[in-house]
Amino acid sequence: MKILILGSGAREYSIALALQNTNENIEFYFAPGNGATATMGTNLNMKDPKVITAYAKASEIDLCIVGSENFLAEGIVDLFKENNIAIFGPTKAAAMLEASKSYMKSFLKKYKIKTAKFLNTTDYEKAKKFIMNLTPPIVIKADGLCAGKGVIIAQTYEEALEATKNMLSGESFGEAGKIVVIEEYLNGFELSVFAICDGKDFILLPAAQDHKRLLDGDKGPNTGGMGAYAPSNLASENLLEQVKKDIVIPTLKGMQKEDSEFVGVLFIGLMVVNGKPYVLEYNVRFGDPECEVLMPLIENPLDLFLACVNKNLINTKITIKNKFAVGVVCASKNYPYKDSPKALITIDNIPQNSHISYAGVSLENNKLYASGGRVLVCVGLGDDIYEAKENAYKLCENVHFKGKQYRKDIAFQVLK
Ligand code: AMP
Ligand code: GLY
């Protein structure tokens, strides 16, 4: 079977690794992939959805799995469908749930799904009026995709007005900021829930938590994510039932009504306020690094992807292991500020119940080099969160490259 995976991060690597560990006879292709995916299959130096589709058709790809949101927003799923090639991910229209925050908020309102009180607007005076009726902190969001940077939590009215002005003028985020979403601030704890959907039915993967800040204790600048763990015991059975009933089911039904049936990963960013789940945002693909801790927990990942593509989840048994996973991101020296010098990666050994998912690496003469950004994720598995964490950190200490930095407190939220 030929599987093409789109993206270049540890997320995409972890999808391939989980499939490879559970199935023989998969031939992997990656576009564009990274230095480590080149050792698992063939990297294709392609970014244009049309070029990728033509390649997939010509080389008889059996299944494409889309890792990153940009391909989805560009409509790669629509192109594959027109060519009758199986692809796991939402269409361009359905991907609007992530690509446009104003669309997402209007959708939530229309289908009565709990979210922070908000206003979508392109008009500064309307924004100002709404802002002055809220109590700081006030949340200002750019409408479009901003690689996780388009959200400002303003501590004062002045800051909120300034952020709004800069977004609407295009100064902060260009076109992506020309519509803003102004939101009330929700105070609670955040949780990532992943519903894997076939358009009608879904399964929930174990709830995960990301660690967005660079430094221990949630200090320092925001990053793409410095580590994750799953399952989180902050997600009680009762909470997950509410998420299914009040969020996932109405979302899938709503998307059907909008003629945008949702197939793929519905990644729900939740704020849990007094035990009640509110939708902060939707993403339409796996989180990174959440994916790296979720994939190893799925017993039969290929069945899951195929069942979604074939709209047959209802007749498919997906088994989730009774295990915990912790993933610690090792990033390069200057992350997230600027590029870092290339550095050779050496590994003493890989202890039992741990493995690496690679991201920012290049392959030269059969050696892997850290090439910047988030370099790799050390994943530990265990029968409880403590064991998983210990295994992840043991591996971290066995991996070396110049300038390596990582958080020492991944999963602190549940380690008492
Ligand atoms: P988003 O991309 O919409 O998930 O926002 C990025 C981050 O901003 C979230 O992970 C939260 O930490 C924070 N955030 C977004 N919206 C709110 C809100 N309404 N109240 C409090 N924090 C928020
Ligand atoms: N880890 C958060 C994200 O992938 O958006």
Image (tube, rainbow, N blue to C red):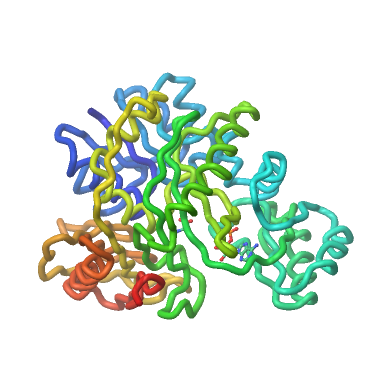
Instruction: Where is residue 344? Give x, y as percent.
Output: 21, 69
Side of 106 relative to 191 (left or right): right
Q: Nearer the viewer, residue 248 or 71?
A: 248
Instruction: Where is residue 105? Give x, y as percent.
Output: 68, 48
Can residue 188 be seen here? The reply is yes
Q: Which residue is drawn at 42% across and 62% down?
A: 209
- Establish if 327 lies above or below 303: below
Instruction: Where is residue 385? Give x, y as percent.
Output: 28, 66
Q: Which residue lies furthest to the front in this view?
A: 238
The quadrant of the picture occupied by the C terminus is bottom left
Side of 354 relative to 214 (left or right): left
Q: Residue at x 30, y 49 (%)?
A: 295
Q: Nearer the viewer, residue 42 or 389?
A: 389
- The quadrant in which residue 202 appears is top left
The quadrant of the picture occupied by the N terminus is top left
Side of 44 relative to 260 (left or right): left
- Establish if 305 lies above or below 171: above
Can residue 344 be seen here? The reply is no
